[in-house]
Amino acid sequence: MKKWKFIGKVLAVIALFLLATTIFAFLSFHLTSFLYDWIGKYPRGYWQQLITVIGVIFFFWCTAIIVFLFGSKRQRVYWDTIVAALRQMSTGDFNVKLDLKANGEDQFGQLISGINNMAIELGEMEKMRQEFISNVSHEIQSPLTSINGFAKALKNIDLTDEKRLHYLTIIETESNRLSKISDNLLKLTSLESQHHPFEPKKYRLDKQLRNVVLACEPTWVGKDIEMDIQLEKILIEADEDLMNQVWMNILSNSIKFTPNAGTICIRLWKQEDAVITSITDNGIGMTAEDQLHIFERFFKSDQSRTISNGGSGLGLSIVKKIVEMHHGTISVQSKVEEKTTFLTTLPILQRVVAEK
């Protein structure tokens, strides 16, 4: 397609050149004839043809100069506008939209389109950056305020031992929460930096899920939760350590929000070249609106419950990023006060074994 477009442009240029030459020759012939009649002299043969050719060259260069001056002025307007837009973007103001009229297929059209797209993308990134900083500041400020407040309360010499121990416990809990936020931020930043180690290998996914359930046994046994597990024997190629974080996070959330004597169902099966995992609990559930944002950073579907359980709203963001690194997908299906299901689909073999 590009080859034919190029040939078409060449033919158009040649046709335009021949047309211009014909017009210039016509104008030159009649202008020289007028001059001959005016001065009363008529050169013959070679000299007449030479003067006509000189006239053609004169018209050609006059036209070229006019086109150059017009095009140069237009280009200066373009470049001045583009430079001004880039300077505006360099100050952090990305509300830039170039309205210069240009063919979208020529160099200026592509450049203008690229700058407009870049301004939009940078504006979105700046918005995300500001929102991220705001969220981080809020999440860190909350435990710091608690630590500061209860540390001041401990200065009261009239406190009973029971209250003093209670305050110290709160300070310890908030310190752990602050540490967890910091660790998750570092982990998420590392995963998104495209330099995080990614070492896929073949291993039994069903065994990994059983080991995760056993690792969480003290928690779900303490709440008298029933574990309904049905796993096919499946060999998968993935980063075992990263996927362990995925299952640990999802299962921990299910245990956290499942009431005493509840049930958690874990299923694993193969479907063509993919493996599907579902983890379902009959806990508090979430609204349809919450399901749209559950994988966003710092999002908490239930503020009071999440804070009391030490959540930071980063765990599921990390889960989604790890699953995407494995070319997989994760989704959630939930009904309030009924159930929540996290459905994960992963390819059995990685398309690019060491892709970052």
Image (tube, rainbow, N blue to C red):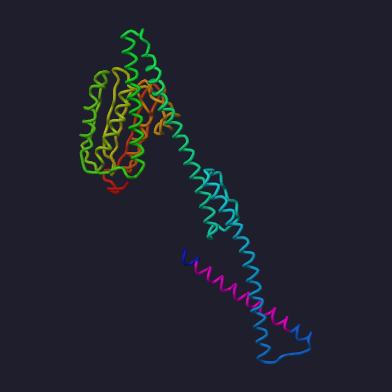
Which residue lies at the image location 34% right of the left edge and 36% below the top edge?
186
**Residue 273 in magenta stretch:** no
Which residue lies at the image location 64% right of the left edge and 64% below the top edge?
70
Q: Is residue 21 left or right of residue 206?
A: right
**Residue 13 in magenta stretch:** yes
Identify the image quadrant of residue 78.
bottom right
Residue 211: give x, y in percent of width and height.
21, 31
**Magenta range:** 6-32
Q: Is residue 309 left or right of residue 1?
A: left
Residue 103: give x, y in percent of width and height.
57, 58
Closer to the camera in the image, 109 or 247: 109
Identify the image quadrant of residue 237.
top left
Closer to the camera in the image, 74 or 222: 74
Identify the image quadrant of residue 250.
top left
Which residue lies at the image location 32% right of the left edge and 19% below the top edge?
259
Q: Is residue 70 left or right of residue 120?
A: right
Closer to the camera in the image, 133 or 311: 133
Above or below, 285 relative to 163: below
Above or below, 110 relative to 91: below
Above or below, 175 relative to 59: above
Residue 21: give x, y in percent of width and height.
63, 77
Which residue lies at the image location 61% right of the left edge and 57% below the top edge?
77
Residue 32: give x, y in percent of width and height.
72, 83
How many dots with numbers?
A: 0
Above or below, 334 relative to 57: above
Name the chief secondary structure element in magenta: helix
Q: Is residue 109 left or right of residue 194?
A: right
